Structures are given as C-alpha cells and as structure tokens.
C-alpha cells in the first residue's frame, strides 16, 4: 500500500528542478537541467475556434507577464539547397490576414524568402510555459504600409536601417559607424530620412498554427489549427 502511494506521488505531483542554481554547477551535465511544467490546462472546449483570436488572447497575457520582448519570435527559412536557418525577429502586427515583421529585403533571410516563401514562426514564452508555432507563406507588405511603419521608428533606427548592408561582410564596426554618421550629416532634419526600397515588411499568411502549453510530467497540451481547403479553420489535439 505504502509503495503504491509513493509511486502515485512521484508520478503525478510536480517535482523540483534538479538544478536549482545552474550557474553554480558549470560542470554538471546539461542533461540534468530541467524544471517541472505546471501550466494552465488547454482544453478544446475553451479555445477560440479562430486561431488568430486564440493567439490574441495568449499574446495579451504575454504582454502582461513577460517584461522584455514578448513579441520576439524565431523566423525559420530555407535556402536553395533546403538548408535551414533561423533568427529572432520582432512581431510588429497581426490580424486575420497574418503576422507582420520588418527587415532588409537584401538580407540573408530576404534572399531565402524570395527563393522559398514558406516559413515558420515560433513564439516561446517560458514564464507562461507556452509556445506558439506558425507555418505559412511570406509575402511583402505594401510600400505604403512599410513607409508608415518606417516613419514611426526612432531616428537612430531609421539611420541604421539605411546604413547597414545587412548580412554582408564589412571591414569593421567603424565602417558602419562612419556610414551612420554620414547619413546623420546628410539628413539634418532626421524626419526626412526616406525608407530605402530594400527595407520593408513581410506578412506571413498562416496555414498551420499550433498552441503548446506545458503541463505536469511532460504530458503537455497541444492544440493544432489547420486551414481548410474551402476556407476557415479546424483544430485537433496532438499528443505531446
């Protein structure tokens, strides 16, 4: 009887982190770094049938709980040889159409999107024990929309966007700083800095959106929405 109770407790009650202060155990095996997930249940009966509305609810909560960069997301692309690459970008808008970010069109990611517009976005909110994984097709936003966002940026960010030949090799940091300084002298009124043609937004139109909620004993919740051929969405539960 006692043995059964112990097995039950070990199986279903949350365990403590096996490494409580990782910085003090530099030589300890990385395999021992773990924590127990105790997230809120994610039930089919309570999710919104529209994934963008479900995302909006989660994103609003993330902005309340996460202090820095709740809009940070991993953008994954592939090159001409189907080699994957990933980097962090910032979400700058979302709607029923999709998810928007801005970048240099001549950057590595810009070239890869031009060759293959199928991309993936991943949000990771560890404080909420949540992830959102999005797969879709990226396309450029309108020039007008890119202009509007560009002009809303701080002057220093606009200068950097113009000065930086993103993803290309440069001789030194000083070269970049000299470019930025030259632009500051050229545009005495920083409000007049124009958006370069090679810089603008992408809209990722989603085809699949998965919501992941960490749960006790790694028995996580996964609800996956897929776009139906005739329009609209359907969702199903996936095994963790």
Image (tube, helix red, strand yellow):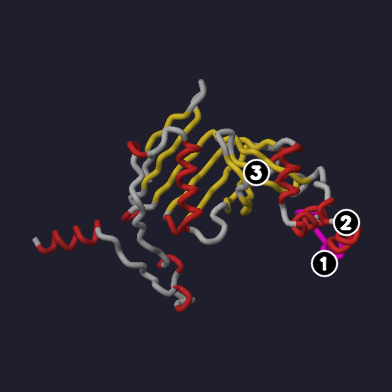
From this view, report whether residue 231 is shown above or below residue 20: above
* Apparent side of residue 206 relative to residue 224 in the rendered image (left or right): right
The kind of secondary structure element at disc 2 is loop
Residue 99 visible in image: yes
Residue assigned mark 3: 78
Give the spatial CA distance, label 3 vs label 2: 37 Å
Residue assigned mark 2: 187
Taking the spot 88% from the left edge, 56% from the top edge, the residue there is 187
Residue assigned mark 1: 172
Which mark is nearer the camera, 3 or 2? 2
Give the spatial CA distance, label 1 vs label 3: 28 Å
Taking the spot 46% from the left edge, 33% from the top edge, the residue there is 50
Quadrant where the N terminus is found in the figure: bottom left
**Relative to the observer, which residue lies in front, 81 or 49?**
49
1 or 2: tag closer to the N-terminus: 1
Marks 3 and 2 in Cβ contact (< 8 Å)? no
3 or 2: tag closer to the N-terminus: 3
| 204 magenta-colored | no
Examine the image and state in which quarter residue 184 appears: bottom right
Magenta span covers which residues?
Answer: 165-179
């Amino acid at each position: 009887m006692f043995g059964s109770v112990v097995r039950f407790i070990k199986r279903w009650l949350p365990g403590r982190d096996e490494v409580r202060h990782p910085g003090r155990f530099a030589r300890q095996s990385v395999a021992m770094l773990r924590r127990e997930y105790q997230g809120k249940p994610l039930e089919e009966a309570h999710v919104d049938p529209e994934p963008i509305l479900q995302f909006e609810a989660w994103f609003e909560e993330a902005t309340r709980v996460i202090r820095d960069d709740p809009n940070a997301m991993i953008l994954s692309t592939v090159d001409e040889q189907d080699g994957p690459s990933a980097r962090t970008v910032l979400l700058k808008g979302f709607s029923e159409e999709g998810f928007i970010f801005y970048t240099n069109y001549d950057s590595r990611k810009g070239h890869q999107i031009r060759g293959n517009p199928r991309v993936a976005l991943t949000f990771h909110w560890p404080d909420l024990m949540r992830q959102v994984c999005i797969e879709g097709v990226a396309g450029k936003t309108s020039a007008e929309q890119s202009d509007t966002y560009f002009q809303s940026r701080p002057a220093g960010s606009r200068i950097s966007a113009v000065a930086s030949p993103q993803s290309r090799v440069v001789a030194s940091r000083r070269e970049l700083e000299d470019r930025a300084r030259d632009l500051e002298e050229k545009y005495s009124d920083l409000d007049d800095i124009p958006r370069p043609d090679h810089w603008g937004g992408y809209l990722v139109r989603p085809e699949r959106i998965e919501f992941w909620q960490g749960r006790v004993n790694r028995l996580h919740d996964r609800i996956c929405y897929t776009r139906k051929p005739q329009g609209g969405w359907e969702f199903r539960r996936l095994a963790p």
